Image: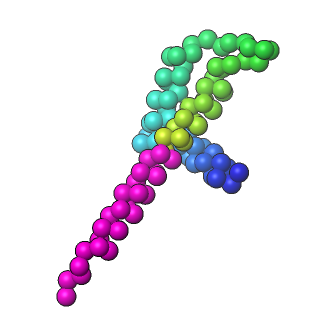
Amino acid sequence: PDSRQALYLLADQFCRRPDSTWGKYLILCKERLQAKHPEVLVLEGKKRYNKGHIHNMAKWRCLTRFVRWLWREWWKLENARAEAEKLPKAA
């Protein structure tokens, strides 16, 4: 739950900084979802694909991509550190 809350707050920062890399990606996600679902659907008495629903879907899609990116970058650093430890140290 704490991780989910942290990601939710991070998405809020993406919304507040639309000129950042991840802010731009969030806007791109919203545009794609709005193009894919231009009209609001009512399923089982619930509205789907309205502006708020699309916004939340785009936020979580953007956050998923961010977490994947973060994991890849972290492992790049870990692998570089492991390789540096294997090399003989210069005297």
**Can you give x and y, in whole percent of width and height, for residue 66 in the image?**
49, 45
Between 32 and 77, which is closer to the camera in this rendering?
77
Q: Is residue 27 left or right of residue 44?
A: left
- Corner quadrant of residue 91: bottom left
What secondary structure is the magenta-colored segment mainly?
helix
Q: Count every numbered label the image shows and give the total.
A: 0
Is 36 drawn above or below residue 21 in the view shown?
Answer: above
Q: Which residues are magenta?
A: 67-91
Is 59 drawn above or below residue 42 in the view shown?
Answer: below
Q: Is residue 44 left or right of residue 66?
A: right
Between 77 and 12, which is closer to the camera in this rendering?
77
Judging from the image, the colouring scheme is: rainbow
Please name the residue shown 60% across and 48% down the image.
Answer: 7
**Can you give x and y, in whole percent of width and height, for residue 63 in the image?**
54, 42
Residue 72 belongs to magenta span: yes
Please name the residue shown 57% across and 13% down the image.
Answer: 38
Q: Is residue 71 left or right of residue 48?
A: left
- Asked if residue 82 shows in the view, the reply is yes
Is 66 drawn above or below residue 41 in the view shown?
Answer: below
Please name the residue shown 32% across and 64% down the image.
Answer: 80
Between 5 and 73, which is closer to the camera in this rendering?
73
- Asked if residue 18 shows in the view, the reply is no
Q: Residue furthest right?
A: 45
**Can you give x and y, in whole percent of width and height, for residue 8 in the image?**
63, 45
